[in-house]
Amino acid sequence: MHAELQKTILIVDNDDDVRLAMAAVLNHDGYHVVEAENGASGVEVAQRVLPDLVLMDIRMPWMNGVEAAERLRADERTRDIPVIAVTGELRTDTAEARRAEGLFDSIIWKPVTATMLMQRVHGTIGGAL
């Protein structure tokens, strides 16, 4: 398997444990995973790597996931990359409102299960190769 043929997924989440768990599931399924700890670094990584998919937490320091998604959608290099919100917010209005505006392709609610993660990833970008 050549890395350049693998689909790349960017995980943007300030919780190390969440990133580690999602990366383990995605790596096991054959995806190439890159990570960022907040929205600002997530935008930078996305612009540099041009991943096939972004998994974006909503609540993060330095730049939240909504603002990061807005920046990705405003950049012609990254505007067509699917972005899935991954959130544990108790209020659904913010994430749902932004999804309706076209920022997020879908939403995964925390706690994330491996099954839900893989169903949503496969449904959005297909298999790892």
Image (cartoon, rainbow, N blue to C red):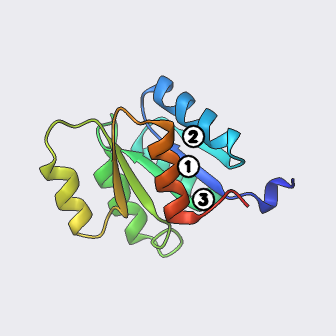
Task: Count numbered badges in the picture.
Answer: 3
At a point 44% along the width and 45% down the height, the residue shown is 116
Q: Residue 103 sits in which quadrant?
A: bottom left
User: Is label 3 in a helix, a strand or a loop?
Assistant: loop
Q: Is mark 1 on a helix, strand or loop?
A: strand
Residue at the limit of the structure toward the bottom, as seen here: 76
The residue wearing badge 3 is 51
Tell me which label, 2 or 3, sits earlier in the chain.
2
List the residue tagged with mark 2. Answer: 35
- The residues bearing labels 2 and 3 have C-alpha atoms spaced at a distance of 11 Å
Label 1 neighbourhood size at 10 Å, few (<14), some (14-19), many (20+)? Answer: many
Q: In this view, does 1 lie to the left or right of 108?
A: right
Find residue 86 and report its horizontal and vertical position in percent: 37, 44
* Residue occupying image coordinates x 69% and y 56%: 128
Three-letter amino acid code at disc 3?
A: Pro
Q: Position of residue 95 (x, y in %)?
A: 22, 52
Q: Which of 85 and 115 is in front in this view?
A: 115
